[in-house]
Image (cartoon, rainbow, N blue to C red):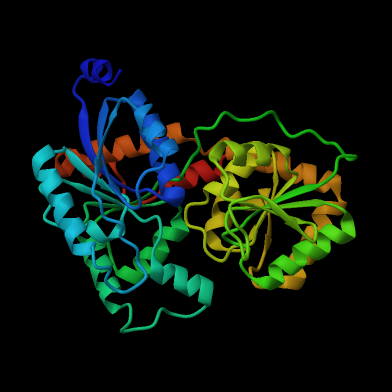
Amino acid sequence: MRQEHERNIRQSLTILMTTDTEGEVWSYTIDLCEALQAHPVCIELALIGKALSTQQSEQLAALPNVQVHDSGFDVRWISDSPPDIKASGQWLVQLAESLKPDLVHLNHLAYGALSWSCPVLLVGHFCILSWWAAAKNEAAPMPQWAGYKTLLSDSIQKASLLVAPTLAALHSLLSHYGPAERTRVIYNGLSRPETAEPAENEDDEVSILVDGAIWQQDSHLAVLTAISKELACSVYVAGEAPSSNSSERCAEGVTFLGHVSPGELQDRLVRASLYAAPTAYEPLGLGALEAARAGCALLLGDIKNLREVWGDAAVYVAPNDVDALRDKLYNLITRPKRRHYLATAAWARSKRFTTASAAKAYLQSYRSLLATEDETAQQLPRSNAASEALLAET
């Protein structure tokens, strides 16, 4: 299958792409590689992270346009300078020298300033300084993270193109790390088949799905417990949460699912009425996008990234305002027509954000970076007019 795909590609691009084997970056990578099958692109995928699961290996085996290279490094930013950051960078450069790709697509912000011999597209999925400012409402302590800031500043400033998933995320990166040679916003998308338009069923029991990675505060969980008791609604926490484990358990009206597979998560979302994620930091936004595509109303953290994507198709709450969180949950649970209106609005808006459209934007960026300097200036504007036009659609 892979050989047939390679034989059919003409004038193909070879892209060396890095990915993390955990979290939303993995989902982003798999969906993008799948969408790029429709284009003449061969992907040499460099894995940095924990060992692949059986399911992940199966996902990669289904992609004939992808060749896998496992670094054996698991770089985690729990300190200013992870021990493997230098060695993993050397491994990447050696891999590039061996493969001789047309372009490097980095999904790790730390590697943009390495000795690359081809253009570098750098994607800002996540950074500690942005997270620290959002989650802790203060600047990350210096000099504890000074080395990290220097490394990422050098990486961003030397990359050929810096891509961010929203304009708000781009502004945050530039505010922390300084100017970039060229920037672009490419909104993340989904390749999942869309469900039917949400139906209005006032008599159905309300089911709430929440992200366990977000609901870490005891006060937030107390709100869920109280709401489930008072209004007799079902509350499910997907992913890791305080005192949860990998097996499903139930405590005081809240069911902790632990880790769930993508298929199980999709099934849960289709059955849910409301997706609640009052996060203070959410650069990728794939969780809300999956929920909206499945027909859920959205209750999200009141942050610029999410407002930029969802506009008036969601309800927002300040992440640390527990009273407001309870009031808005109560309002959405007890007003089925309002909940249906929001679910329909989010479902309709989610259709703008597809992996196919993201793949086309990345392909344009690849080709622009490989063009002459004059052609690049014409093909890849420094403004984000195309992205803003997408959000302006009705």
Q: Where residue 246 sits in the image (x, y, percent)?
A: 58, 52
The quadrant where residue 60 appears? top left
Q: Nearer the viewer, residue 354 or 61?
A: 61
Q: Is residue 93 left or right of residue 194?
A: left
Q: Where residue 342 sits in the image (x, y, percent)?
A: 73, 46
Residue 337 seen in the current view:
yes
Taking 38 as reference, is 234 above or below it?
below
Q: Nearer the viewer, residue 335 or 313?
A: 335
x 67%, y 41%: residue: 268
Report the quarter where the N terminus lies.
Answer: top left
Residue 358 seen in the current view:
no
Report the quarter where the C terminus lies.
Answer: top right
Taking 58 as reference, is 49 above or below it?
below
Q: Is residue 286 left or right of residue 320?
A: left
Q: Is residue 280 left or right of residue 254?
A: left
Q: Where residue 272 sits in the image (x, y, percent)?
A: 73, 43
Q: Is residue 333 left or right of residue 367?
A: right
Taking 35 as reference, is 241 above or below it?
below
The quadrant where residue 267 appears? top right
x 20%, y 19%: residue: 10
Q: Where residue 13 sits in the image (x, y, percent)?
A: 21, 31
x 18%, y 23%: residue: 11
Q: How many marks?
A: 0
